Image: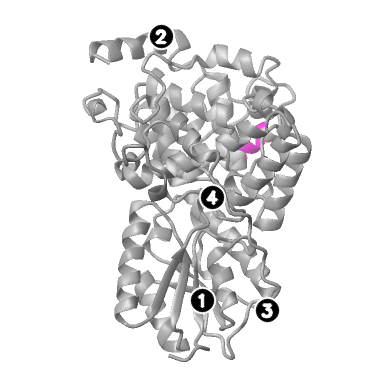
C-alpha cells in the first residue's frame, strides 16, 4: 500500500480540532485525511435530545473542518460496511478513531478493528475522551476501584498530558468521496417543536467550549465549591454538553483547573475532583458494564421498585407536575434548556426512586431521551448513586428532602420562580417556554392551577425507609 494512501478519520464523540490525538497522528503522517462520520445503529437508538444535539454538533464540526481545507463525509449503515465501502472508493490504507468505552461501542470497535486488520488495513484507536484509560488505574491488589475517594487519590498526582495543538491544515485527498447530506438524516425529528425552544441554550463547538472554560476559570472557579449547589446561580462551567460530544477534551479542562489551583483559586481543586468523578464513572462502566442496565449491587435485585412508567405519579414526575416545586422546576429546566443543574438532578432522582419508589432505570431512560448533555456512564452512575443501588452510593437512609433542600439551596425561590409559571401573575419567560417545549398531547397551560403533591416529602421518606428496612437494607 502506498505511503500516500488516505487515512479515514472516523469521527464519533470527538468533535474538535484541538487536542485530538487521532487527528494529530493522521496529520503527522503527511497522508491525505478523510474525516467520516457514520450513522449506524448506535446513533439511531439515541434519545431525542442527544441525537438532535449530535446533529447540531456534526454540522458545526463540518464547518470547522472546512476552515482547515477538509470536509466531513456522512455515511449511514453498519460501521464496518460503511468504512469498507469508503476504503474501496478511496484506496485508504488506514482507519483511525478515538476510543469509546460503553459495551456496545467496545463490541463494535473490536469487530471493526479485527476485520480491517484481516484485510491488511491499519486500524488504530486513540485516547482523548478520558484522561485515564480505565485499564491503567488499578488498586494495590490489581483490581478496579469501586469507591471514588481512593480512585481520586490514585490519579490526582498522575501526569496528564498537555493538550495537543490544532493542525494548521488537514491534508486533503485529490478527490473527495461522495457524502450523504446531514439534513437527510433528520436527527432532530423526535424533538419536534421543542427544538426551537432548546436551541438558544446550546453552545456548539470547541470555540464556544473553550470560551466557557476560560470564563469559568476567570470568574467562577474561585467560588465554585461554595456556590455550585445553588441552582439559581451561574456558578458552574456548563461544559457538560461539550464534554459529552468531545467538543473540548478533559485534558484541557484539567490543565486549566491545575493552573487555577496554582494561582490560589479556592474552588479549583474541587473542580478537578468533579472531572475525576466523570473519569470514575467511565472506570466503572468499563470494568462493570452491567451498571448501565442492572443494579450494580446485586442485593438490590429484589427491591420492590415500581416498574410501571405509566402510573399517574410517574407521569406527573415526567411532566414536572409533582406538586413539589424543586422537582418540578428541575424537570422544566431540562425541557427548556436540555440540561439540568447537578443538585437538581439529585433531588429529581431521589424523589423518583425514593419518594415514588420507582425503578431508577425509568429515570435513566427519561434523562437519556431529554438531556442534550447525556453521557452513558455519568447518567447510569448518577441514578444508581442516588437510588442506593450503585457504587459509592448514597446510603438507604439518605432520602433527600426536596422541601428542605429548596430552602437550603434556593432560599429566595429564584430558581423555582424562573421555571414554574402556574399561579404567577407575571411568570418568567423561561417558565412560559416550558409550555412551548413539551408535547401538545400533555395538554398543559400556564393558566392551570399548580398541583398538590402527588407524594409529600414526609410521606415519601417514611414509605422509602419502611421499604428499605423491611428488606434488610
Which disc, if any, is residue 448? none
Residue 14 highlighted magenta (yes or no): no
In 3D space, how far apart are the residues under numbered discs 3 and 2 (Cα atoms)? 62 Å
Residue, x 52% and y 30% (percent of image)?
Answer: 345
- The mark lying in front, picked from 2 and 4, is 4
Task: State which tag comes first along the sequence, 1 or 4.
Answer: 1
Image coordinates of residue 393 in percent, x first then y, are: 39, 26
State whether residue 94 is above or below residue 332: below
CB under 8 Å between discs 1 and 3: no
Q: Where is mark 2, residue-wise?
A: 459
Q: Secondary structure at mark 2?
A: helix
Q: Gap in Å between the C-alphas at discs 3 and 4?
A: 26 Å
* Magenta segment includes 434: yes
The residue at 56%/86% (across/down) is 176
Q: Which residue is mark 4?
A: 244
- The numbered mark, 3 or 2, whose residue comes first in the sequence reads 3
Q: Residues within 10 Å of mark 4 (few under 14, many from 20)?
A: many
Gap in Å between the C-alphas at discs 1 and 3?
A: 19 Å
Ranked by sequence position, the earlier of labels 3 and 4 is 3
Amino acid at each position: 500500500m502506498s505511503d500516500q494512501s488516505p487515512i479515514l478519520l472516523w469521527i464519533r464523540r470527538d468533535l474538535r480540532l484541538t487536542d485530538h490525538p487521532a487527528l494529530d497522528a493522521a496529520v503527522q503522517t503527511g497522508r491525505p485525511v478523510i474525516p467520516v462520520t457514520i450513522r449506524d445503529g448506535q446513533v439511531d437508538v439515541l434519545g431525542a435530545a442527544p441525537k438532535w444535539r449530535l446533529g447540531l454538533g456534526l454540522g458545526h464540526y463540518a464547518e470547522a473542518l472546512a476552515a482547515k481545507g477538509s470536509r466531513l463525509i456522512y455515511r449511514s449503515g453498519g460501521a464496518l460496511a460503511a468504512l469498507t465501502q469508503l476504503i474501496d472508493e478511496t484506496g485508504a490504507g488506514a482507519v483511525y478513531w478515538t476510543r469509546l468505552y460503553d459495551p456496545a461501542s467496545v463490541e463494535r470497535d473490536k469487530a471493526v478493528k479485527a476485520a480491517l486488520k484481516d484485510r491488511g488495513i491499519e486500524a488504530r484507536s486513540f485516547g482523548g475522551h478520558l484522561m485515564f484509560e480505565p485499564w491503567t488505574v488499578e488498586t494495590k491488589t490489581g483490581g478496579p476501584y469501586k469507591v471514588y475517594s481512593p480512585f481520586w487519590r490514585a490519579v490526582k498526582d498522575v501526569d496528564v498530558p498537555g493538550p495537543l495543538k490544532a493542525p494548521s491544515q488537514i491534508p486533503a485527498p485529490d478527490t473527495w468521496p461522495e457524502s450523504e447530506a446531514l439534513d437527510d438524516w433528520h436527527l432532530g425529528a423526535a424533538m419536534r417543536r421543542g427544538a426551537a425552544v432548546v436551541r438558544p441554550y446550546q453552545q456548539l463547538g470547541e470555540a464556544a467550549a473553550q470560551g466557557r472554560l476560560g470564563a469559568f476559570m476567570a470568574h467562577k472557579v474561585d467560588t465554585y465549591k461554595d456556590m455550585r449547589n445553588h441552582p439559581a446561580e451561574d456558578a458552574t462551567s456548563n461544559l457538560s454538553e461539550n464534554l459529552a460530544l468531545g467538543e473540548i477534551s478533559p485534558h484541557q479542562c484539567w490543565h486549566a483547573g491545575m493552573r487555577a489551583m496554582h494561582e490560589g483559586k479556592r474552588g479549583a481543586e474541587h473542580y478537578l475532583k468533579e472531572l475525576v468523578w466523570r473519569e470514575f464513572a467511565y472506570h466503572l462502566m468499563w470494568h462493570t458494564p452491567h451498571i448501565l442496565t442492572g443494579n450494580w449491587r446485586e442485593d438490590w435485585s429484589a427491591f420492590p421498585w415500581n416498574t410501571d412508567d405509566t402510573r399517574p405519579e410517574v407521569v406527573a414526575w415526567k411532566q414536572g407536575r409533582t406538586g413539589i416545586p424543586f422537582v418540578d422546576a428541575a424537570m422544566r429546566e431540562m425541557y427548556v434548556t436540555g440540561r439540568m443543574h447537578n443538585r437538581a438532578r439529585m433531588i429529581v432522582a431521589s424523589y423518583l426512586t425514593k419518594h415514588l419508589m420507582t425503578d431508577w432505570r425509568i429515570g435513566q431512560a427519561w434523562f437519556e431521551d431529554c438531556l442534550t448533555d447525556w453521557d452513558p456512564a455519568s447518567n447510569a452512575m448518577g441514578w444508581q448513586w442516588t437510588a442506593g443501588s450503585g457504587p459509592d452510593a448514597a446510603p438507604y437512609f439518605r432520602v433527600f428532602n426536596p422541601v428542605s433542600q429548596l430552602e437550603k439551596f434556593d432560599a429566595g425561590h429564584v430558581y423555582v420562580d424562573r421555571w414554574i409559571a402556574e399561579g404567577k401573575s407575571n411568570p418568567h419567560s423561561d417558565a412560559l417556554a416550558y409550555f412551548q417545549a413539551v408535547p401538545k398531547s400533555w395538554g398543559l397551560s400556564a393558566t392551570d392551577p399548580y398541583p398538590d403533591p402527588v407524594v409529600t416529602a414526609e410521606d415519601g421518606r417514611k414509605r422509602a425507609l419502611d421499604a428499605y428496612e423491611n428488606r434488610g437494607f
